[in-house]
Image (spheres, grey):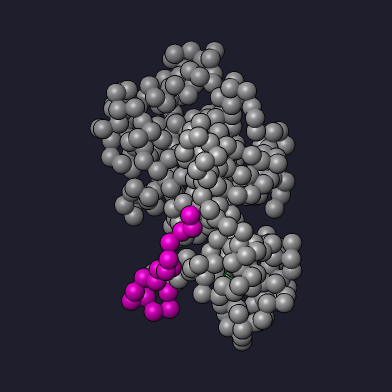
Amino acid sequence: MSTPLLNVDNLRTSFQTGRPAGRVPDVQAVRGVSFAVARGETVGVVGESGSGKSVTAMSLLNLLPDTATIGVDSMTLDARSIFGLSRKDERELRGKQIAMVFQDPMTSLNPLIPIGKQIEEMFLVHEAGMSKAERRRRVIDMLTEVRIPEPAKRYNSYPHEFSGGMRQRVMIAMAMALRPQVLIADEPTTALDVTIQDQILRLMRRLQVENGTSILLISHDLSVVAGLCSRVIVMYGGLIMEESPVADLFSRPLHPYTIGLLGALPALQVSADRLVSIPGSPPDMSAPGDGCPFAPRCPYARVRCEHRLPGYYSAGPGHRSLCWLLDAEAPATDSPFGAADGPKRSGVRPL
Ligand code: SF4
């Protein structure tokens, strides 16, 4: 990977759930997550609900409620720290350098304000010297860029006058208005039907290429990630379980959780008559324990897995996995690939 634009080292985010503090254990939503995103790169973050992917994204922009405590060894954008900023610098960061698109535009857009005015707000806050006429022109340009028909006319339309797909286009216009360096898209197509999903993903791809934006795409849908991303981060229990270039992840998944997710993807099933699901439920993050959080659901779990978290093992350039099975001393028969697939572990080394 070229020099990273966004670098996050050992991010930890927890939530206080009861009062007085300390009586009820905090929910440890993110437990030491490190990753980097290069300029112009699209990185997917996948995992079930509660895996910590959205909290990771919200922690970057400090968008969490007061009950959250965020800790990080370092968090930089373009080599400049973005953690612990003043309110003024934080406002500057949000929208101008890192922008976010959420799953449901209806809850992000104000139903009482015309969409043109809502996009204009970005220029009012961040480009104070811009004239009213110029602001209006820039909004219409943005609506044109995201292919809203008759943009000058739709400037005065209210959110309820748009379809779900069009509302998401408006959100993307708002997010891209100030040409941010990084766009975080949190389940941007989940609420949309498949054909509209495809249009929105193409739109994001086009804007990314035109503007050189980096994208962090959060999704529970591996097929969406496969279509748009060059790298994938798989999260579970507030940790990165596996990180890999996208082609490598689909052809050589190494973590049992990733293998389970891929098994749940209809197109990749060997016998596609039934959707495979991963038995069990996500861990209780108020008591995640010292072992591998996937152990209660993992068909390959051993005693060691329940008591000690493994370290990362490298399985090739940009490919790492957090699993004891990759330890040189783990018997090949413990492998999810079976004894005959021992070679899949060749070249794996502790990080
Ligand atoms: Fe399964 Fe153990 Fe690997 Fe966790 S560390 S995924 S429990 S084999």
Q: Nearer the viewer, residue 68 or 203?
A: 68
Residue for point 49% across, 58% down? 283
- In the image, is residue 229 above or below residue 27? below
Residue for point 42% across, 20% down? 136
Residue for point 70% across, 53% down? 1
Kindly tell me whether residue 232 is visible in this rendering. Answer: no
* Spot occupied by residue 5 in the image (x, y as percentages of width and height): 67, 41
- Lateral position of residue 14 relative to residue 275, left or right: right
* Spot occupied by residue 4 in the image (x, y as percentages of width and height): 69, 45
Is residue 2 on the magenta stretch? Answer: no
Range of the magenta residues? 269-284
The C terminus lies in quadrant: bottom right
* Spot occupied by residue 114 in the image (x, y as percentages of width and height): 32, 24
Kindly tell me whether residue 34 is visible in this rendering. Answer: yes
- In the image, is residue 157 above or below residue 331? above
| Outermost residue to the left | 161
